[in-house]
Amino acid sequence: MGKGLSPEQLVRRVREAAEPVIASFDLMLWGIEVVSGGRTVVRVYVDAPAGSSAMENGSGEDGVLEGVSVDHCAEISRMVGLALDVDEVFSDAWVLEVSSPGMDRLFFEPSQLASYAGRELDVMLSDPHPDIAGRRKFRGPLVSVAGDSFVMEVLLAPAEGEKPAPSNVSIRWDWVRKARLVPVFPDTSKPGAGKNAKKAAGKGGGKQA
């Protein structure tokens, strides 16, 4: 982990190093995920800006996967890794992974949800929903987004013993532990279908295990 840094401070340091590098490729930073363990893994997700030529020329299911190439990810990984090494952000062994968000993209802020209305989400809350006792997991189509909250349509049982029925559930973003897009897999019988998201991984600096 970083030298005496909180998870929030570590994400900020990675963001400061990554954003200018990613922008130099006419791409944008989608989000940063830090996974601690025996060796810290830093995942940087890179996307093509909405309306960009890279996005328009893409053929991924959500229209953006083809905007980020393997070469982009490899070069961004190299440049960001060097910057973090120079700043000595990490005191122990760590790994940097750079990739497109993929078909099951992870969301990092509520504003990212807006363009996915109607698509199915898989959401895990940190604690049970205050209005639905004991339930932390929700899966269903996104209905709407407003500020720091969003509404999903999920199956709920109106009363014990009754058959679950579709219901709209409002969720505040600060309740969310993790939210992902449920992928819609392309018809592999069509030419060019079934391409995977791009990814490049590089070993960061710091002490080796």
Image (spheres, grey):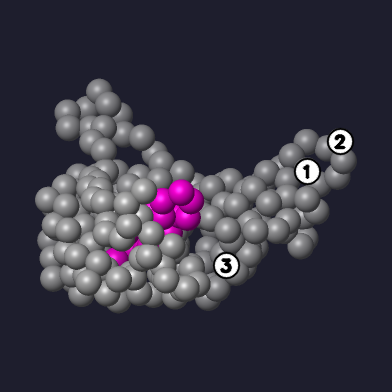
> Crowdedness of circle 2 by 10 Å Cα count: few (<14), some, many (20+)?
few
Q: Position of residue 200 (x, y in %)?
A: 22, 48
Q: Could you say which is closer to the camera, residue 171 or residue 86? A: 86
The numbered mark, 1 or 3, whose residue comes first in the sequence reads 1
Q: Which residue is mark 1?
A: 157
The numbered mark, 2 or 3, whose residue comes first in the sequence reads 2
Tell me how far mark 1 sits from mark 2, CA to CA: 8 Å
Q: In the rendered structure, which amino acid carries the disc numbered 2?
A: Gly
Span highlighted in magenta in the image: 29-44
> Crowdedness of circle 1 by 10 Å Cα count: few (<14), some, many (20+)?
few
- Identified at 46% across, 73% down, the residue is 5
State left or right for residue 41 relative to residue 202: right
State left or right for residue 164 relative to residue 86: right
> Crowdedness of circle 3 by 10 Å Cα count: few (<14), some, many (20+)?
some
Marks 1,3: beta carbons within 8 A: no
State left or right for residue 25 relative to residue 117: left
Q: Nearer the viewer, mark 2 or mark 3?
A: 3
Secondary structure under tag 3 reads: helix
Q: Which residue is mark 2?
A: 161
- Identified at 60% across, 69% down, the residue is 174
Q: Which residue is mark 3?
A: 173
Q: Nearer the viewer, mark 1 or mark 3?
A: 3
Secondary structure under tag 1 reads: loop
